[in-house]
Image (tube, rainbow, N blue to C red):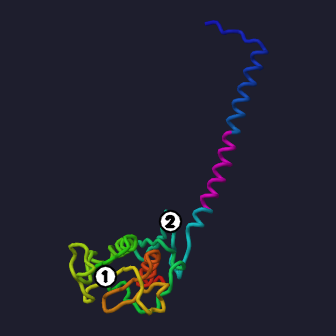
Amino acid sequence: MIKRIISKSEQEKKRKRSSLIIGLILIIVMFGSVFGIVVGSFGENFSKKNKAEYNGYKFSNENNFWRTSIGELEFVFQYFPSQTRNITSPLKNINNYYNKPLYVYSEDVNSEIEIYRNLQQIASRIQPACFNKENCTGDFPLKTCADNFIIISEGTEEGSTESSLGEITQVENCVYIKGEKQDLLELTDSFLYNILGIK
């Protein structure tokens, strides 16, 4: 087979084209590396910004939820502990709920979800219930403070000094979380942080 003869000018053009292609590839690789380093550093900064510590507990913020682990259990909250109020009345700790049925009456669905999400791994089961027949809108069992019972309701007690802040109190095994509609989820997180010993 006869090899085609290439003139010097064609050889020069071919060499320049090859050099240009190699140069472009090197530029792309260099920019890619720099871009990767920059994006990686943003990722590290982003990751650091989404981590926080409170009272010795490490938290990470994922999808606007604060997560922390206690032993092998993971807990998820809408509010970070410092965003929640301090509870002055005594509450029984998490051991009071361990492997026992828990009943919940709630006038706020988000607060109810927060209770289920965090205490379902502690209680033997969680079930809706009613405290009295007047407020019972479903076919739920009537329970008393002899049972572990969390009652989340809107409004405030008349004459209460904490009326604008909401309140969390415990009577026997009943926990009352009461406040304005917009405060109930934050009050629920306050309760959970308290019984878990985080706050």
Q: Which residue shows up at 66% across the image and 53% down it?
A: 38
Q: Which quadrant would residue 97 be assigned to in this image?
A: bottom left
Neighbor class of circle 2 (other Cα within 10 Å; few <14, some 14-19, many 20+) is few
Q: Position of residue 12 (x, y in %)?
A: 77, 20
Q: Amino acid at mark 2?
A: Asn
Query: Considering depth in this image, is 109 or 172 the residue closer to the camera?
Result: 109
Q: Which residue shows up at 30% across the image and 83% down it?
A: 149
Quick one: SS at disc 2?
Answer: loop
**CA distance for labels 1 and 2:** 28 Å
Q: Is residue 146 left or right of residue 184?
A: left
Q: Amino acid at mark 1?
A: Tyr
Q: Is residue 10 magenta?
A: no
In the image, residue 2 above or below residue 25: above
Magenta stretch: give its range. 28-44
Residue 27's disc is none
Q: Position of residue 173 (x, y in %)?
A: 30, 88
Neighbor class of circle 1 (other Cα within 10 Å; few <14, some 14-19, many 20+) is some
Magenta span main SS: helix
Quick one: SS at disc 1?
Answer: loop
Q: Disc 1 marks which residue?
A: 98
Query: Considering depth in this image, is 112 or 133 the residue closer to the camera?
Result: 133
Q: Which quadrant would residue 126 be assigned to in this image?
A: bottom left
Q: Which quadrant would residue 28 be assigned to in this image?
A: top right
Q: Is residue 34 left or right of residue 75?
A: right
Q: Disc 2 marks which residue?
A: 64
